[in-house]
């Protein structure tokens, strides 16, 4: 996963309330990915699902939840811990709307798996 692409996606999600709202309403991974592409991001489905899963796990970890070994391994995937933590710090501190949008995407992705 390209860090610039991840950073740009998360920045847009934090900044744009309309984008957040659409992502919260996404009922399937395909819908979520179509919304992401509508906003100019070119993720493949597997890449997008991996990103959403990593971000949600990192958000849970930042909020003080303990992750099991499998979740820690997933959260470490794709980028170094420090790089990913720095990339998502803004999204975690941006509040429940962003985390809710991410959680909705991950739930949709999990339902499809």
Image: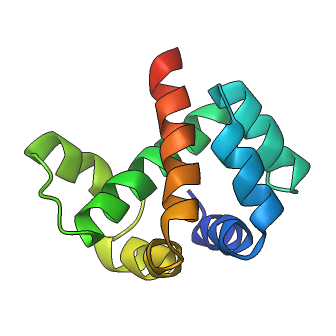
Could you tell me residue 54's position as x and y percent? 40, 52
Could you tell me residue 108's position as x and y percent? 55, 28
Q: Is residue 89 left or right of residue 35?
A: left
Identified at 64% across, 29% down, the residue is: 29
- Visual colour scheme: rainbow
Res 92 quadrant in image: bottom left
Look at the image and tell me whether residue 38 can be seen. yes
Look at the image and tell me whether residue 77 can be seen. no
Q: Is residue 93 left or right of residue 6?
A: left
Eyeballing the image, is 77 above or below 4?
Answer: above
Could you tell me residue 33's position as x and y percent? 73, 38
Q: Is residue 29 left or right of residue 64?
A: right
Identified at 86% across, 56% down, the residue is: 39
Question: Considering the image in quadrants, where does the N terminus appear?
Answer: bottom right
Eyeballing the image, is 77 above or below 61?
Answer: above
Identified at 84% across, 46% down, the residue is: 37
Residue 12 or 85: which is nearer the viewer? 12
Eyeballing the image, is 74 above or below 78?
Answer: above
Identified at 47% across, 73% down, the residue is: 88
Could you tell me residue 24's position as x and y percent? 64, 45
Res 81 quadrant in image: bottom left
Residue 58 or 2: which is nearer the viewer? 58
């Amino acid at each position: 996963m390209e860090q610039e692409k991840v950073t740009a996606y998360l920045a847009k999600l934090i900044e744009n309330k309309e984008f957040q709202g659409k992502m919260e309403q996404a009922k399937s991974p395909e819908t979520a990915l179509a919304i992401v592409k509508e906003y100019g991001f070119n993720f493949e489905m597997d890449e997008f699902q991996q990103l959403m899963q990593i971000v949600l796990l990192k958000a849970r970890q930042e909020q003080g939840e303990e992750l099991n070994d499998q979740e820690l391994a997933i959260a470490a995937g794709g980028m170094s811990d420090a790089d990913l933590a720095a990339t998502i710090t803004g999204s975690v501190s941006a509040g429940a709307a962003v985390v809710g949008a991410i959680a909705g995407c991950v739930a949709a992705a999990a339902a499809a798996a």
